[in-house]
Image: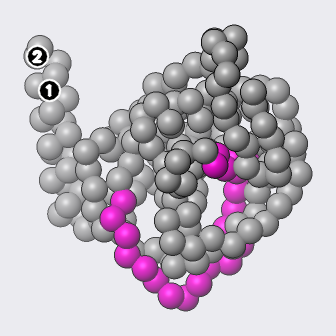
């Protein structure tokens, strides 16, 4: 059953009938150039977008992660799924999200990313944000976020804007990370 209410949808899988309608999607890995493409706004929230959301949620939960932007699966439309809850039963869907206000106060959190597996580092961002987005019915809504939710929203919107969290790091860290990832890729190709 797919239960929709406002901007959150609860995903439950009572039978294999519904599961076959979903697909695990391939997550792009940094430094893939496609991660730097800016996503276009969703023109119409329709069944295609709702299917994309279901597939993205399934992929995010399977990874496992707390957020996934469509850019990370090589779909360049402004769609984000997130679930920062402990029990992973509070999926948030943001279509065409935009941050309309940021606090002056900054906070540093350790971030990771499904597109940069195994890499974690501290990133400073505004501590609180106000967000406007569309829900699965195409209705506009606004809300305020702080703590992990604020971090996740800013991180995922960065993806929609073609930016990966490691771009918030120093140039030295970015250069070392790219070199390490290229080396790992070469070693994988030899196997």
Number of other residues with Cα within 10 Å of mark 2, as a class: few under 14, some 14 to 19, many 20 or more: few
**Label 1 crowd (10 A; few <14 / some 14-19 / many >=20):** few
Q: Is residue 40 above or below residue 12?
A: below
Q: Which residues are magenta?
A: 90-111
Along the line of sight, which residue is nearer the eye, 14 or 96? 14
Q: Position of residue 127 (x, y in %)?
A: 51, 79
Up the image or down, 157 lies above or below 128; here it is above
Pinpoint residue 169: horizontal percent, then vertical percent: 30, 65
Q: Label 2 belongs to which residue?
A: 190
Q: Position of residue 100 (x, y in %)?
A: 71, 72
| Residue position for label 1 | 186
Count every numbered label the image shows and give the total: 2
Element at badge 2? helix
Q: Please name the residue shown 26% across and 50% down the image.
A: 119
Task: Check if residue 92 falls in the magenta segment.
Answer: yes
Q: Nearer the viewer, residue 133 or 64?
A: 64
Direction from residue 100 to residue 37 in the image, left or right? left
Verify CB contact (< 8 Å) between mark 1 and mark 2.
yes
Q: Residue at x 10, y 16 (%)?
A: 190
State whether the magenta stretch is mostly helix, strand or loop: strand
Quick check: 142 left or right of 72? right
Please name the residue shown 63% across and 70% down the image.
145
Assign the C terminus to one quadrant of the image: top left
Vertical arrangement, residue 93 with respect to residue 20, above or below = below
């Amino acid at each position: 059953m797919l239960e929709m209410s406002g901007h959150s949808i609860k995903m439950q899988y009572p039978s294999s009938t519904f599961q076959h309608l979903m697909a695990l999607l391939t997550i792009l890995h940094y430094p893939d150039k496609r991660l730097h493409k800016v996503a276009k706004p969703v023109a119409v929230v329709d069944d295609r977008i709702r299917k994309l959301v279901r597939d993205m949620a399934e992929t995010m939960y399977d990874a496992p992660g707390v957020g996934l932007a469509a850019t990370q699966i090589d779909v360049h439309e402004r769609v984000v799924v997130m679930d920062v809850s402990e029990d992973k039963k509070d999926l948030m869907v943001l279509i065409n999200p935009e941050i309309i206000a940021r606090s002056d106060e900054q906070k540093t959190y350790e971030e990771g990313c499904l597109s940069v597996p195994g890499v974690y580092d501290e990133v400073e961002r505004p501590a609180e944000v106000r967000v406007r987005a569309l829900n699965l019915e195409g209705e506009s809504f606004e809300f305020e976020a702080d703590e992990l939710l604020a971090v996740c929203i800013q991180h995922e919107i960065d993806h929609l804007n073609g930016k990966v969290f490691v771009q918030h790091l120093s140039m030295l860290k970015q250069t070392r990370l790219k070199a390490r990832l290229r080396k790992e890729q070469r070693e994988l190709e030899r196997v």
